[in-house]
Amino acid sequence: MNAPRTIAEYLSQLREALRGADPALIQDALYDAEEHLRAELAENPRRSEAEMLAHVVGSYGAPEEVADIYRDQEIKIQRALRPPPPPKRRSVLGRFFGVAADARTYGALFYMLLSLATGIFYFTWAVTGISLSASLSVLIIGLPFIVLFFGSVRVLSLMEGRIVETMLGMRMPRRPVYSVPQMGLMKRIGHMFTDLHTWTTICYMWLMLPLGIVYFTLAVTLLSVSMAFIASPLALALDHTSFGDLIVDAHPLINWGTGFHDIGWFDVTLLCAIGVVLLFATLHLARALGIMHGHIAKHMLVPRESN
Amino acid sequence: MEDNASHLKKFQKELSAGTVSLVLLAVLGQSRQPMYGYQIAKRLEEVGEGVLSGKQSALYPVLRNLEGAGLLASEVEPSVSGPPRRYYRITKPGREVLRDWVDAWNATRASVDAVLQGGV
């Protein structure tokens, strides 16, 4: 590979060298490299860009070396920061109940509850921003407003990425998208519109409202139903009448498909067992949805490798 | 000979894997104001090759890790020359950890020196 002569060339070589790596990792590596190179250039204003880069290859590293260092670091970080994987369980029962010992389950469950709030916020922000951008575009303040809105979308994308990485364990960028340098202001604004990544981010913000509603409803409904089932023996012990609408002549009734009868200890024990199974099934569902949502977020919020 | 060089390179890499975090924490612990990545790299360059046998690009992921662990805090400030710079400073838990690490380093160095000088 030729020695890079401009910062843009260096960065594109670095991007090339990192091909196939995690897109989030590539975004971080490009950001770090650009920060360092520009600082180096600013420190020695008399040196030309090409001279500076020749020097940098010795100190900061050639693109291929930097790529190796980041790949190497990533493996170490993953090992150090991830919670230890839960012990593998062989038996079907162990696998079913083992979900409760997995830290990711609770992260995903919490994310499901949080997603209603963030979903409403993102949706409102995106819809308001887009419609105001469109309607203000005929006025002189339209352009700055649009630029501000698109900028805010990038910040929100990074923030959501941090939430997703913390709660769902999906590797997301830690630094904002590296923007194409050396372009005029108008070109830069034009690039915001033609950049597919901006639009997928806005789509994600829209999508978060329906998804948030579904996640929140599922989590709340399933958790409360299973908790209620688990607590049914307590209800029977404390108060016969708490079984609600099924009371006939002051007797609560239940029907398992064999006809109505008075609720007894057998019934509540069965309900309790169903509740426990339902609770763990809910945990499984939360973990699965968490993994699925992590992939959705990664595909829509992290720019793909482009040529 | 080439074999020896690769052994040396591997050893330097393993050595720096542990010491880079300590050195970064120490540099930020001594600094009065927050520093950004490039400044830290230059500071280490002044000290000499030994501290950072690898390339300076290795610093940035480590800085990020230390921040992730809560030992450093950072803020972004715009700069005239390029992308906004991220300034790092040491946190209170960071100082406590640094003290422990320095003790561990001193103990390791003392025992390694003792072995190397044939004191065992």
Image (cartoon, grey):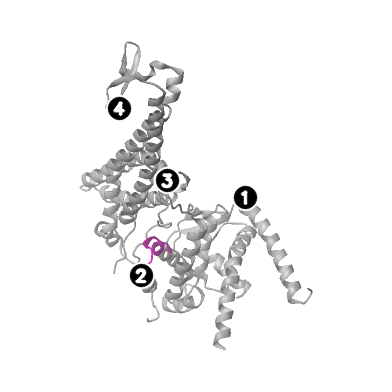
Determine the residue positioned at 37% across, 41% down.
A281
Residue A96 location, x and y as percent? 41, 45
Mark 3 residue element: helix
For residue A107, which quarter of the picture? top left
Marks 3/1 in contact by CB < 8 Å: the verdict is no
Residue position marked by numbered label 3 in the rendering = A93
Give the label, 3 or 2, closer to the camera: 3
Instruction: Provide the residue span drawn in magenta.
Output: A21-28
Q: Residues within 10 Å of mark 3 (few under 14, many from 20)?
A: few
- Mark 2: which secondary structure? loop
Q: Quick one: SS at disc 4?
A: loop
User: Which residue is at a point 40% across and 33% down the rendered structure image?
Assistant: A273
2 or 1: mark nearer the eye = 2
Residue type at numbered disc 2:
Arg
Identity, as a three-letter code, of the amino acid under mark 1 = Lys
Which circle's residue, 4 or 3, is located before the other in the chain? Answer: 3
Where is residue A109 shown, x and y percent of the image? 40, 42
Q: Residue at x 30, y 38 (%)?
A: A213
Q: Is residue A121 magenta?
A: no
Work out whether residue A47 can be spotted.
no
Q: Amino acid at mark 3?
A: Leu
On the image, numbered disc 1 is attached to which residue?
A: B92
Read off the chain for label 2.
A
Left or right relative to A66: residue A259: left
| Residue matched to label 2 | A19
Q: Is residue A127 visible?
A: yes
Q: Residue A256 — which label?
A: 4
Q: Is residue A128 above or below residue A232?
A: below
Q: CA distance from mark 2 to mark 4?
A: 59 Å
Q: Specify the amino acid type for callout 4.
A: Trp
